[in-house]
Image (cartoon, grey):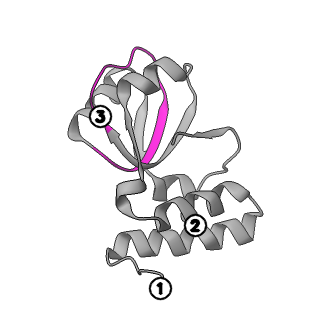
Amino acid sequence: MKRKKTNPRVSGLIKSLYKKSEESKEALWKDVAKRLESPGKNWAEVNLSKLNRLTAKGETILVPGKVLGTGSLDHSINLYSFSASKAVSERVSKAGGSYNKIEDLLEKSAKGVRIFK
């Protein structure tokens, strides 16, 4: 038996991701939707220190889960995730980048987006 998400933001986002995947024929959106359908304990949790080590300046990063504020960021990135701690948006903007929710990325093209698991 498949469990249904009770958070209306999650279920709405999943529906939007599947719809965008069908419209744009981009597999990225379907992959993110499937990851968000999994139990919350299996969602990605990525620290800023890991993003700092594995990304380059100006990259667009998608985290289908939560970004945690441990560590620092010494270059600008465009970061999108389902949620993040308060420190994340402050540190990302301090480094010259931007932090937004996944819903904001749906309106843009997925070309060049990297997913962190």
Q: CA distance from mark 2 to mark 1?
A: 22 Å
- Amino acid type at image mark 1: Met
Q: Secondary structure at mark 1?
A: loop
Residue corresponding to mark 1: 1
Q: Which comes before the other along the chain, label 3 or label 2?
A: 2
Q: Position of residue 16 (x, y in %)?
A: 55, 71
- Left/right placement of residue 111 relative to residue 5 reads right
Q: Position of residue 71 (x, y in %)?
A: 30, 21
Q: CA distance from mark 3 to mark 2?
A: 24 Å
In the foreground, 44 or 62: 44
Q: Which mark is residue 17?
A: 2
Residue type (three-letter) at the residue carrying disc 3: Val
In the image, what residue occupies the spot 48% across and 81% down? Answer: 2
* Residue at 61% from the left image edge and 52% from the top image edge: 108
The magenta stretch spans which residues?
Answer: 68-84
Graded by Cα atoms within 10 Å as few (under 14), some (14 to 19) or many (20 or more), the crowding at tag 3 reads many
Q: What's the amino acid at mark 2? A: Leu
Q: Residue furthest top?
A: 74
Q: Which residue is mark 3?
A: 88
> How many numbered badges does the structure rendering display?
3
